[in-house]
Image (cartoon, rainbow, N blue to C red):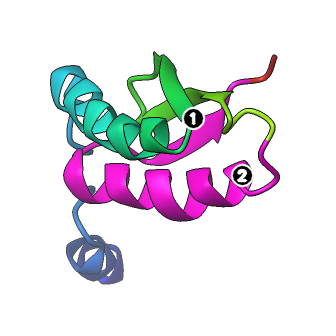
Amino acid sequence: MAENENAAQEPAKEEKPQLNRALLEETINIIRQSLQADGGDIALVDATDDGVVTLEMQGACAGCPLSTYDMSEGIERILKEHVPGVTRVQPALL
């Protein structure tokens, strides 16, 4: 009986929302406007089914020492808030 009690107490596994690629691209285009105003840009390289988004920093952003911070604290935060299914944002390895 103890096994049944433990099974009943286990939380149900949540299904991860499916990544909406159209919403992802739309949100990235909004972010791009701010980056382009400063001479930079980003490009979507890949988005996996498990929510990992790979972006390439371009223009002024490509050589900027703060681009890693911008990606993790800015872009990733925005994408996670506005695009269900995004789990992580990573830079493209060139």
**In this rendering, is residue 51 above or below 79?**
above
At horizontal 77% and vertical 46% (from top left) the residue drawn is 64
Q: Is residue 76 left or right of residue 65?
A: left
Inspect this view and state whether residue 54 appears. Answer: no
At horizontal 20% and vertical 75% (from top left) the residue drawn is 8
Task: For marks 2 and 1, give the CA distance.
Answer: 13 Å
Picture coordinates of residue 21, whole percent (x, y): 24, 22
Q: Which residue is mark 2?
A: 68
Q: What segment carries the magenta color?
A: 64-92
At horizontal 73% and vertical 32% (from top left) the residue drawn is 62
The numbered mark at residue 40 is 1
Q: Amino acid at mark 2?
A: Thr
Inspect this view and state whether residue 60 appears. Answer: yes
Image quadrant assignment for residue 13: bottom left
Q: Amino acid at mark 1?
A: Gly
Closest to the observer: 10 or 87? Answer: 87
Q: Secondary structure at mark 1?
A: strand
Q: Is residue 92 left or right of residue 2?
A: right
